Image (tube, rainbow, N blue to C red):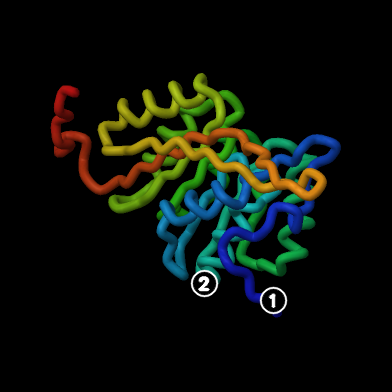
Amino acid sequence: MTRWSPGIPDHLFFQRKPEKGLITKAEIRVLSLARLALRESAIVWDIGAGSGAVAIEAALLAPQGRVFAVEKNAADAAIMRRNIEKFQVNNVTVIEGRAPEALARITDEPEAVFIGGSGGEMAEVIQVSLARLPDGGRLVINVVTIDNLAAATQACKDSGYPFEVTLLQAARSKPILDLIRFDALNPVFLISLVKDRTPQEREPQEDV
């Protein structure tokens, strides 16, 4: 059986074509999974799972756990199932449906939640995820637009739990004749939150 290290190359996943592919790029995926800090027996939700790259890597990191991959697009869910079969991860369950409604069909409470897509319901998805996460649970969100960044950060602020935002920018080398240039990947905002205290215990923010 092939042993995969974190950051499986993007081209190894089946992806929607002719678009660039609905997939969290390897550089972003590695950092997002690191923030989730998964135990081997972790229960993980991947909301807006797309091609399933994050769900599959989470399943490999938590072989004794369970990953629930929620995806509203039937075509993407079908591609994700092909990837699950390719990488032979039997601890991923695909949930077809729109979040947050589809989350009610998951009976297993998560200890880590990744949000890669919200279908325009970012605040509600975050609220439901935080309500289901236990103390110490982790929430990681990837957004690429300033609109979703605003919605996600406001929802995190409203929760009262401490969070941080990291802007990730990467570029990959590409040959041009006998030279090398770089192709930039889309910038991604990574929002991470640990549900490690009650909102009332949150330390006051200093004015900057």
Q: Looking at the image, which residue is at 39% across and 27% down?
A: 153
Marks 2 & 1, CB-CB < 8 Å contact: no
Label 1 element class: loop
Instruction: Inspect this view and state whether residue 100 appears.
Output: no
Instruction: Inspect this view and state whether residue 136 appears.
Output: yes
Label 2 element class: loop
Q: Residues within 10 Å of mark 2 (few under 14, many from 20)?
A: few
Farthest residue to the right: give it: 18
Instruction: Give whichever of discs 2 and 1 has the lower sequence position.
Output: 1
Image coordinates for residue 124, horizontal then vertical, percent: 47, 28
Task: Classify residue 208 as left or right of residue 40.
Answer: left
Image coordinates for residue 158, horizontal then vertical, percent: 31, 26
| Mark 2 lies on residue | 64
Viewer-nearest residue: 170 or 27: 170
Farthest residue to the bottom: give it: 1
Q: Is residue 196 above or below residue 155?
A: below
Q: Quadrant of residue 99?
A: top right
Q: Looking at the image, which residue is at 71% across and 66% down?
A: 87
Viewer-nearest residue: 5 or 16: 5
Q: Quadrant of residue 191?
A: top left
Q: Looking at the image, which residue is at 32% across and 38% down?
A: 163
Image coordinates for residue 111, horizontal then vertical, percent: 41, 55
Question: Residue 2, which numbered label?
Answer: 1
Identify the image quadrant of the N terminus.
bottom right
Q: CA distance from mark 2 to mark 1?
A: 18 Å
Of the residues shown, which amino acid type is indicated by label 2?
A: Gln
Task: Classify residue 55 as left or right of residue 33.
Answer: right
Image coordinates for residue 47, horizontal then vertical, percent: 56, 42
